[in-house]
Amino acid sequence: MPENPPDETDFIHSEQFLRGLMKRQLRLSISCASAFLLLLLGMPLVNYFAPEFMARRVGGFTLSWLVLGVLFFPYVWIIARWFITRSMALEAAEVRLAADENKRLS
């Protein structure tokens, strides 16, 4: 048992605050995972259903190799950047919300 338990009026330790934070973080994580899985699972499907399209040459590469070998990593970096940026924005919003709520409760 902690020596100094959180005050009952401390909003940042409330179930409501933590539940809301976890929901927003889960929504962000699912959207980032969906964007990644879209490319990961979409590539084999496009190769299967449109092989002539994916066999086109672009810059000396077939389109499938261009996407897999060159464009895949920037795509993942963009998803990672989006996740980090949104995560930091969520945290900043939560800090503001907690501070405002604690002021209101005191």
Image (cartoon, rainbow, N blue to C red):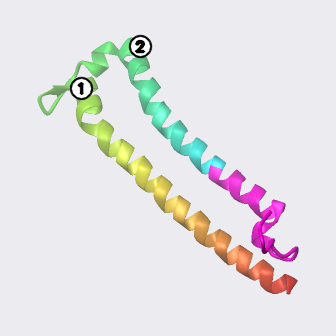
Secondary structure beneath dot 1 equals helix
Return the residue at label 1: 65
Question: 59 or 88: which is nearer to us?
Answer: 88
Position of 82 with respect to 13 (left or right) is: left
* Quadrant of the frame with the C terminus: bottom right
- Residue in the picture at 24% in, 18% down: 55
Q: Given the image, on which type of amino acid does mark 1 rest?
A: Trp
36 vs 22: above or below: above
47 vs 15: above or below: above
Residue most extreme to the left: 60
Question: 75 or 1: which is nearer to us?
Answer: 1
Q: Estimate the x, y position of residue 76 in percent, counting from the top left.
A: 38, 43
**Of label 1 and label 2, which has the lower sequence position?**
2
Q: Estimate the x, y position of residue 37 in percent, counting from the top left.
A: 49, 32
Position of 94 with respect to 53 (left or right) is: right
Disc number at residue 49? Answer: 2
Which range is magenta? 1-25
